[in-house]
Amino acid sequence: MNKKTIKDVCVKGKKCLVRVDLNVPMKGGVITDENRINGALPTIKYLMEQGAKVILCSHLGRPYNIFNDKIKKIKPEDESKTREELVALTLKKCSLAPVAARLNELLDNKVTFATDVIGESAKAAVAACKEGEVVLLENLRFHAEETKNDEDFCKALAEFCDVYVNDAFGTAHRAHASTAGIAQYGLCDEAVAGFLIGKELDVMGGALETPVRPFVAILGGAKVSDKIGVINNLLEKVDTLIIGGAMAYTFFKAKGYGVGTSLCELDKVDLAKELIAKAEAKGVNMLLPVDTVVATDFPNPIDAAIEVDVVPSNSIPDDKMGLDIGVKTRELYADAVKSAKTVIWNGPMGVFENPTLANGTIAVAKALAETDATTIIGGGDSAAAVKQLGFADKMTHISTGGGASLEFLEGLELPGVACLNNK
């Protein structure tokens, strides 16, 4: 996807409205993980250095729309609260003020925080913004119009925008005002990608369009239904497709195996048969687990100690459920990765949150960490697993989007990317 980036346009003296992902976890108003802030910094710093007037916008959490006349969809526990109380509660939980404070520390006190999005505070802050300075607008989702891609809201945001920059890949699959609408409605002179989205397009897009072969894809997670489109698209592109996680049990059922009490989508068994047949017809080597870690019950709580057995995948006992791939499967999958030149991984191999059931996911992560291949982690749980297991720095690329990376792997057009200018 040959999209323009911030390096392809002149930004000096221009207002650059930058959609970033500052949806950071917070506890009691304190940021507990700064990864998304750090991910946004290269684009922000580059624009500052180039003399742009940098206007940042982001969402945070799932707040009430407090800038609307009437606050709707109240949670049951909040129904008795007054509007003033709801506004105060929302600001406490979902204001970007703590993020602005941290950005100010990281950017030499050149960040001004606007206490609204398109109101008087925002207008004053943008008007006063000098070249090389930054304004952070308040949480976009305080306005219901943001997620509705309301044209009037887009026009109001576009008052702060000569150049539109999207650098929030995690929301690029949403056709919201700040992720797509401004460019879709033709309200900016230029619409370009920041460094984060630029890398996603270069690395993930390159792997899908012109992979160095052998090309191996590893798909895990709970449900075949979540990844039908991804599997179909990858079967057109890969040399080997590896299946793990609970979705494997639907494929087992399609092959006539018993699955015990394992999670299995009975209404997707015929589809699994079709996918197996398609892989064979395309000459794709589809690998399924040859042995399975089983237990009597799902761990509760999820990280609780649990007794397990390892059985052949075609011999799961009627009273047991599969919860991870077995030792032989780990070796089989690791061997497939060793011979690969490009590997894409999306979804864990088992219940990786449990120490006893994390070994399959660890084995795959370790195999990717040790290979010389281009290794791409497709966001979501697999990205969390790689980071949690300490292998993040060994990967070529870890996608910043969960749902967005899945849709990208599926071959779908992402609104936040489609709206950007081509080179």
Image (cartoon, rainbow, N blue to C red):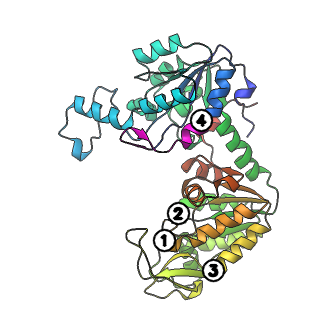
**Mark 4 and mark 1: Cα distance apart in space:** 39 Å
Please give left or right for residue 341 compared with residue 294 in the image.
right
Q: Is residue 43 above or below residue 216?
A: above
- Sequence-wise, which precedes: disc 3 or disc 1? 1
Estimate how packed mark 4 is, as few (under 14), some (14 to 19) or many (20 or more) residues with alpha carbons within 10 Å: many
Marker disc for residue 225? 2
Marker disc for residue 265? 1
Q: Secondary structure at mark 1?
A: loop
**Mark 3 and mark 1: Cα distance apart in space:** 25 Å
Residue 13 % position (x, y): 65, 13
Circle 3/circle 1 CB separation < 8 Å: no
Q: Secondary structure at mark 2?
A: helix
Residue 366 % position (x, y): 67, 66
Q: Nearer the viewer, residue 2 or 133?
A: 133
Q: Residue at x 19, y 32 (%)?
A: 82
Residue 319 sits in quarter: bottom left
Q: Secondary structure at mark 3?
A: helix
Q: Hey, what amino acid is under mark 3?
A: Val
Q: Residue at x 48, y 15 (%)?
A: 125
**Mark 2 and mark 1: Cα distance apart in space:** 8 Å
Q: Which residues are magenta?
A: 26-39
Circle 2/circle 1 CB separation < 8 Å: yes
- Sequence-wise, which precedes: disc 4 or disc 3? 4
Q: Residue furthest left?
A: 80
Mark 4 vs mark 1, foreground winner is 4
